[in-house]
Image (cartoon, rainbow, N blue to C red):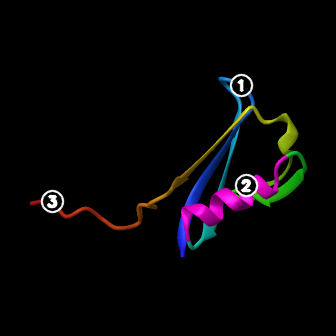
Amino acid sequence: MKEFKVTYFFDENHYIRRFIHLDSQEEAEDLIQSERDQYISFRDSRGIYHELNTEDVRVVQISEYHRVDKTKKKVSK
């Protein structure tokens, strides 16, 4: 399963980011298209609950996300 970053832009300065887990980019696009012009709800990575009316969104971006494990310590040479 792949992780995708979905960013909902309201204007140049305001956006909400959501992460979804699906098998392909096409499935991610289908999901976002099926949610168009309706209310959706989700929790972000910090556990904050969001309700979003997708009708108010101006731009949606979807990209595959490659999470970096920040808990691994760097080895200095």
Which residue type does callout 3 highlight?
Ser
Which label's residue is closer to the chain start, 3 or 1? 1
- Gap between marks 3 and 1, in whole Å? 43 Å
Would residue 28 be counted in the magenta stretch? yes
Q: Which residue is mark 3?
A: 76
Question: Is 3 displayed left or right of 53 in the figure?
Answer: left
Q: Is residue 24 left or right of residue 58?
A: left
Q: Residue at x 19, y 64 (%)?
A: 75
Relative horizontal placement of residue 17, taking residue 57 as reference (left or right): left
| Magenta residues (range) | 24-36
Amino acid at pointer 2: Ile
- Please give the name of the residue rendered at 73% of the width and 61% of the height, measured from the top-left corner: 31
Q: Earlier in the sequence, mark 2 or mark 3?
A: 2
Label 2 and label 3: CA atoms lie apart by 43 Å
**Are the residues tagged 2 and 1 within 8 Å (C-beta)?**
no
Decide which of 72, 30 is in the foreground and name it: 30
Q: Nearer the viewer, mark 2 or mark 1?
A: 2
Q: CA distance from mark 2 to mark 1?
A: 19 Å
In which quadrant of the rendered view does residue 56 lie?
Answer: top right
Residue 41's label in the rendered image is none
For the residue marked with disc 1, what is the amino acid? Answer: Asp
The image quadrant where one finds the N terminus is bottom right
| Other residues around mark 1 within 10 Å, as few (<14) / some (14–19) / many (≥20) | few
Q: Give me the disc on residue 11.
A: 1
Judge depth for marks 3 and 1 and give the one in front.
1
Residue 28 horizontal/vertical position (percent): 64, 61
Per the image, the residue denoted by label 2 is 32
